[in-house]
Image: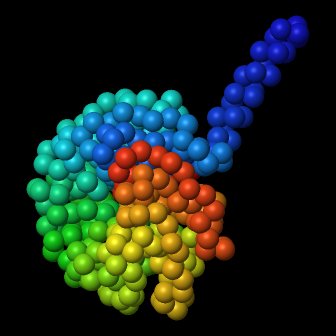
């Protein structure tokens, strides 16, 4: 092999290795800026800002297709971003005011909650054709998919309920009452427990994820917005909007064990794939707080854009 050929082979190998080993990225919606800040989680700084019109709010990561979906409540749908090139690919119309957004575990379907139409619309991710619109409760917001890809869970804010959608049939299997105005939800890695932040009752509902049986109610801070799990599901982190704090709940005892001060008006929260670091979007401070779950301390604050929300699971793997 010639020297030139050897050099080119080295460059290609390096590029492939870099791509494979690229650090996870956090996609933070800045609603008042009509933009998305992209954070390189290894270097802990914003590497790109992508313009997204329509007051972007919700975020979902399609790991299989290397795409990011951004709900646009004032745009009546969602934007599709390339997770590697950090570019806009297309806009998809839904209607009404899209807020919550989620992707199935295989990356084949994207689910969009319509706040005004009280529905969840299902799209195929190959060509973004509409597959079905499912009527749920009033003002659907947070959504998450079970690890086995069997269930979609939907928080119906005005109805104070959680709906469980069968993804094989695309029909509702069960609906259960929770606290006042549920918003952000998450399910554990075993698909056993579902956690829901109830904004108006200042608490967390804990449900059996299989049948939605209510297991416990945990008091947290003022106006809890969203939730995330870390350290092998042993700790639940909850953003408290009006306290500018994050509550830490021990999932074994189902008790609050710590309170961490973050930025003003924390909203979106997501766990890093290392299962140790938690990213919190602070709406009024226009930044992101990074929490070490082991020490329960804020270890970094990253400047983003105006009105950072990042509602959903917003970090790639």
Tell me residue 238's x, y (percent).
44, 73
Q: Quadrant of the N terminus?
A: top right
Q: Quadrant of residue 156?
A: bottom left
- At horizontal 37% and vertical 29% (from top left) the residue drawn is 89
Q: Is residue 107 above or below residue 143?
A: above
Q: Is residue 201 left or right of residue 11?
A: left
Tell me residue 252's x, y (percent).
54, 88
Q: Is residue 141 left or right of residue 60?
A: left
Q: Is residue 159 left or right of residue 226?
A: left
Q: Is residue 249 left or right of residue 218?
A: right
Q: How many marks?
A: 0
Q: Is residue 316 above or below residue 183?
A: above
Toward the viewer: 49 or 170? 49
- At horizontal 81% and vertical 11% (from top left) the residue drawn is 5
Q: Can residue 139 be seen from the camera position used here?
A: yes
Q: Quadrant of residue 176?
A: bottom left
Identify the coloring.
rainbow
- At horizontal 57% and vertical 60% (from top left) the residue drawn is 290
Tell me residue 201's x, y (percent).
27, 83
Q: Quadrant of residue 149?
A: bottom left
Q: Is residue 208 above or below residue 138?
A: below
Q: Can residue 208 be seen from the camera position used here?
A: no
- At horizontal 29% and vertical 56% (from top left) the residue drawn is 100
Tell me residue 298's x, y (percent).
59, 66
């Amino acid at each position: 092999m010639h020297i030139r050929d050897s050099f080119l082979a080295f460059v290609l190998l390096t590029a492939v290795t870099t791509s494979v080993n690229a650090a996870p990225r956090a996609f933070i919606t800045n609603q008042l800026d009509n933009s998305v800040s992209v954070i390189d989680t290894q270097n802990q700084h914003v590497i790109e800002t992508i313009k997204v019109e329509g007051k972007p709010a919700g975020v979902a990561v399609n790991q299989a297709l290397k795409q990011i979906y951004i709900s646009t409540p004032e745009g009546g749908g969602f934007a599709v971003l390339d997770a590697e090139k950090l570019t806009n690919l297309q806009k998809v119309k839904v209607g009404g005011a899209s807020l919550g957004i989620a992707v199935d575990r295989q990356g084949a379907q994207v689910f969009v909650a319509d706040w005004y139409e009280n529905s969840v619309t299902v799209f195929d991710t190959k060509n973004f054709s509409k597959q079905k619109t499912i009527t749920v409760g009033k003002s659907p917001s947070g959504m998450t998919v079970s690890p086995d890809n069997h269930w979609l869970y939907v928080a119906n804010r005005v109805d104070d309920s959680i709906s469980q959608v069968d993804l094989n049939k695309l029909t509702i299997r069960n609906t259960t009452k929770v606290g006042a105005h549920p918003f952000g939800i998450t399910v554990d890695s075993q698909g056993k427990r579902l956690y829901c932040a109830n904004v108006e009752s200042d608490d967390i509902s804990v449900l059996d994820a299989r049948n939605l049986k209510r297991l416990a109610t945990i008091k947290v801070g003022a106006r809890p917005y969203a939730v995330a799990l870390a350290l092998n599901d042993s700790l639940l982190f909850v953003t408290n909007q009006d306290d500018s704090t994050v509550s830490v709940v021990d999932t074994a005892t189902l008790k609050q064990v710590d309170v961490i001060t973050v930025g003003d008006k924390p909203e979106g929260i997501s766990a890093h794939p290392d299962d140790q670091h938690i990213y919190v979007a602070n709406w009024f401070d226009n930044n992101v707080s990074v929490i070490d779950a082991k020490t329960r301390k804020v270890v970094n604050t990253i400047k983003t854009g105006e009105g950072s929300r990042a509602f959903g699971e917003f970090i790639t793997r």
